[in-house]
Image (cartoon, grey):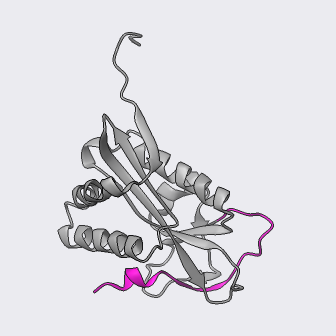
């Protein structure tokens, strides 16, 4: 039964700040705790994107002044796209394990996509679980390819219905090329 006097855990979604860098690293490490090498790699990617000024959108989820989630979007190049095509990659999305299944990740994705729309982005790609990302409008796209990506895992979402939909090889920022 609903208790109107029960405390409510409020999650705030906001742009990352300089003071969040270490907390973001801890969230990424916790989110990938089952795969520590992957967690370290994801943190290095985010740090390299930040250092290169290539974080188009970087958001944190905060509860009780504690960062519990993070999402990053960075520009991608698409082989057959015009030079003024503005597509982004969503990577990574990280939520502390103790905060999962509370819509933190979904809130970060929705808020991040809204931020991309405000930036005038044409679209977004993600390498991920089609069942999870379909709720946001992502779908497999046979016109796009990412070297080494498992079949059906590269998903795309057009954010601007008036922009031409590109086709070709997707090239993530060089920060993703870390060993």
- Compared to residue 83, the image places residue 158 above or below, namely above
Question: Quadrant location of residue 103?
Answer: top left
Q: Measured from the top left, where is residue 95 in percent x and y? A: 33, 51
Relative depth, front residue between 170 and 75: 75
Range covered by the magenta-colored residues = 158-179
Residue beneath the point at 64% across and 68% down: 123
Quadrant of the rendering where the N terminus is positioned: top left
- Compared to residue 24, the image places residue 39 above or below, namely below
Q: Measured from the top left, where is residue 20 in percent x and y? A: 32, 54
Residue beneath the point at 50% across and 83% down: 146
- Compared to residue 63, the image places residue 53 above or below, namely below
Residue beneath the point at 28% across and 86% down: 179
Relative depth, front residue between 174 and 3: 174
Residue 173 in magenta? Answer: yes
Relative depth, front residue between 30 and 21: 21
Residue beneath the point at 65% across and 74% down: 86
């Amino acid at each position: 039964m609903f208790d109107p006097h029960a405390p409510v855990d409020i999650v705030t979604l906001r742009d990352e700040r300089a003071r969040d860098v270490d907390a973001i690293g801890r969230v990424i490490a916790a989110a990938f705790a089952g795969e520590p090498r992957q967690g370290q790699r994801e943190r290095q990617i985010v740090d390299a994107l930040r250092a290169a000024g290539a974080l188009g959108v970087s958001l944190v989820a905060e509860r009780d002044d504690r960062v519990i989630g993070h999402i990053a979007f960075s520009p991608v190049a698409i082989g057959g796209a015009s030079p003024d095509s503005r597509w982004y990659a969503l990577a990574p999305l990280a939520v502390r394990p103790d905060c999962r299944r509370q819509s933190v990740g979904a809130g970060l994705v929705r808020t991040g996509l809204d931020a991309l729309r405000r930036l005038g982005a044409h679209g977004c790609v993600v390498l991920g679980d089609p069942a999870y990302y379909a709720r946001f409008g992502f779908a497999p796209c046979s016109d796009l390819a990412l070297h080494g990506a498992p079949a059906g895992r590269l998903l795309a979402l057009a954010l601007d219905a008036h922009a031409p939909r590109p086709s070709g090889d997707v090239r993530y920022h060089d920060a993703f090329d870390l060993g």
